[in-house]
Amino acid sequence: MDSQKRIVFFGFSEVGHQCLKYLLESGYNVVAVFTHDTDPHEEHWFKSPEILAKEYGIDVFKPKTLKTEKWFRKVRYMKPDLILSLYYRNFIPEEIFSCATLGAYNMHGSYLPAYRGRAPLNWAIINGENFCGETLHVMEKSFDTGCIVCQKKIEIGPEEYVGEILPRVASCALDVLKESMPAILSGNPKLTPQDETKASYYGKRTPEDGIIDFSKSAREVFNLIRAVSRPFPGAFFDAEGRRAIIWRAHIGAPTDFEPGSIVSTDPLSLACSDRLIIADEVEYV
């Protein structure tokens, strides 16, 4: 390992924290950490790269945007050999990522080229996928399109909730990074182009995207519930001036009731297009 190579680290969330922790404990030369604050609606369930960096005496920067000459100059002055982006949410301009002599690499939370874009794990569960993944790829101007250095799959069980999968996501990302670092620092990583015929893209999700459409099948509704359950804002419906967040549920019997009808209140059972969805945990707000 070349501990003298200068690494500028961009990261956030549990993936960012665990990967930064590995780099620092392994003696890699991280010269600066860029991160940002939690979104106002977001539950802060993960550890912070910021706190970890400060413990090691590393400069931390939290710009609202990197798209200014100030930050172009700042990063160039750091003379990075390597730039790593581990779940950093802000756009990193080419003027920044192109200045690393060994290249710039981004960790994306899907098995690329599927699920480019935002919230890939949530979207994969919503769509009923049986796996997601972690992919380290070359950073480019366009999101999540660069050649793949390393990727691994993460299985998703048909009844699993997002909170049960998240620990495996961070662990998988860490494994991908560990496997990739020697080749990257040697300047000769094996790069595999993405197959554009298999590419898909999904956009950012907001709390309001958790609204339940009962005209869909019970399986589709159940997938939404488990995809946005804790630590995310939850799937919900509004009735009689109240919002009901369904945190956990299961699929019930076939039904002929109009979709959205409350068939029972104890337990709360609602009609979908084909079957009932039965709430195992519901919160009224």
Image: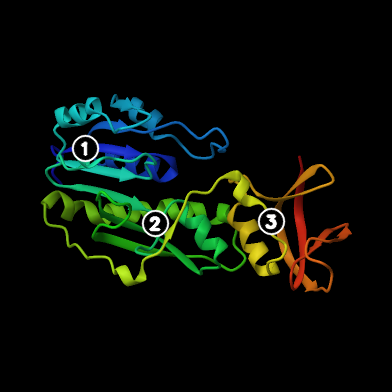
Disc assigned to residue 212 = 3
Q: Position of residue 231 (x, y in %)?
A: 58, 45
Image quadrant assignment for residue 219 = bottom right
Q: Give the side of residue 97 with respect to residue 42, left or right.
A: left
Q: Amino acid at mark 1?
A: Ile
Can I make out residue 24 in this image?
Answer: no
Quick check: 7 above or below 155?
A: above
Circle 1 — which element?
A: helix
- Nearer the observer: mark 2 or 1; the answer is 1
Amino acid marked by disc 3: Ile
Disc 1 target residue: 96
Residue for point 83% across, 74% down = 256
Q: Which element carries disc 3, helix, strand or loop?
A: loop
Q: Nearer the viewer, residue 263 or 227?
A: 263
50 vs 142, left or right, is: right
* Marks 2,3: beta carbons within 8 A: no
Q: Nearer the viewer, residue 80 or 258?
A: 258
Q: Residues within 10 Å of mark 2 (few under 14, many from 20)?
A: many
Q: Earlier in the sequence, mark 2 or mark 3?
A: 2
Residue located beneath label 2 in the image:
172
- Tell me, for residue 145, which label it has, or none: none
The residue positioned 67% from the left and 63% from the top of the image is: 221
For the point 54% across and 36% down, which residue is it? 44
Instruction: Give the class, few, some or many, for how many residues have Cα within 10 Å of label 3's Cα (few <14, many ≥20).
Output: many
Q: Is residue 156 in sight in this rendering? A: yes
Residue 15 spot, x, y in % from top left: 40, 46
The residue lying toward the viewer, choosing from 86 and 144, is 144
What's the distance in space between the residues labelled 2 and 1, CA to CA?
Answer: 27 Å
Report how far apart the C-alphas of labels 3 and 1 lie in the structure: 41 Å
